[in-house]
């Protein structure tokens, strides 16, 4: 029998980024990082630059964390200690040793840097090597070409389009692109990501 699959809030640290378990104390720093509404162009929820929206978003993750369905992190850039975004394990499926990495956003100043690559690396490594995941999935708006390319660069396989999958805050029902990485694919993906992070 496989050991229990039980994701919990833990500190994950790399060379460029530290993922701190999300807490209410992060709210001011998250708000500061969320000022540009373009960051949330393809988000399901409203842009998080307003305190009311960020508080609602943060409360939902913390509620899910208490219920065992989510694990949230603040993404902290090590070079200056600034919170530059957030990311989450969600759709945790204990019996089937699976989860999704999502609810991820990065401030424009940290986009196209090692921050997001290493954050995903840390989350994937923790999922496969510490927790014993069989499958990790990532989803994004079908129209978000940049996000789809970034997910593919992680070594994930594109599995298709989930049509009319998710209602956005503005009433639009989006099609969602879904990707996955399996435990047996992780060693090759890990090697490629580690090579990228050394560049």
Image (tube, helix red, strand yellow):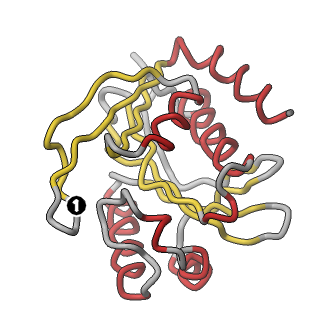
For this view, does 12 lie left or right of residue 24? right
Give the quarter of the figure containing the N terminus. top left
Residue beneath the point at 70% across and 43% down: 118
- Mark 1 neighbour class, 10 Å CA radius: few under 14, some 14 to 19, many 20 or more: some
Question: Where is 95 relative to 70, above or below?
Answer: above
- Picture coordinates of residue 14, whole percent (x, y): 77, 46
For this view, does 82 lie left or right of residue 31? right
Residue beneath the point at 62% across and 80% down: 29
Give the quarter of the figure containing the C terminus. top right
Question: Where is 42 relative to 195, above or below?
Answer: below
Q: Quadrant of residue 169?
A: bottom left
Label 1: element kind: loop
Question: Where is 86 relative to 115, above or below?
Answer: below
The one of 160 and 26 positioned closer to us in this rendering: 160
Residue beneath the point at 22% across and 42% down: 175
For this view, does 135 lie left or right of residue 168? right
Q: Quadrant of residue 125?
A: top right
Question: Where is 82 relative to 156, above or below?
Answer: below
The one of 198 and 39 positioned closer to us in this rendering: 39
Residue beneath the point at 81% across and 61% down: 78
- Picture coordinates of residue 26, whole percent (x, y): 58, 77
- Picture coordinates of residue 97, whole percent (x, y): 38, 28
Please give the residue where the numbered disc 1 appears in the rendered image.
Answer: 168
- Picture coordinates of residue 58, whole percent (x, y): 41, 73
């Amino acid at each position: 029998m496989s050991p229990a699959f039980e994701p919990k809030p833990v500190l994950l640290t790399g060379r460029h980024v530290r993922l701190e378990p999300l807490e209410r104390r992060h709210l001011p720093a998250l708000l500061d990082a969320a000022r540009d509404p373009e960051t949330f162009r393809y988000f399901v929820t409203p842009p998080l630059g307003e305190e009311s929206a960020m508080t609602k978003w943060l409360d939902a993750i913390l509620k899910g964390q208490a219920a065992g369905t989510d694990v949230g992190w603040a993404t902290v850039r090590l070079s200056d200690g600034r919170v530059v975004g957030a990311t989450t394990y969600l759709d945790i499926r204990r019996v089937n040793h699976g989860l999704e990495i999502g609810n991820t956003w990065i401030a424009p100043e940290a986009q196209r840097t090692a921050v997001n690559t290493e954050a995903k690396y840390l989350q994937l490594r923790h999922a496969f090597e510490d927790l014993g995941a069989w499958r990790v999935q990532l989803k994004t708006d079908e129209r978000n070409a940049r996000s789809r390319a970034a997910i593919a660069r992680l070594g994930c396989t594109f599995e298709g389009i989930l049509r009319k999958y998710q209602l956005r805050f503005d009433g639009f029902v989006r099609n969602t692109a879904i990707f996955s990485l399996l435990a047996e694919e992780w060693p090759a993906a890990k090697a490629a990501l580690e090579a990228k992070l050394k560049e």
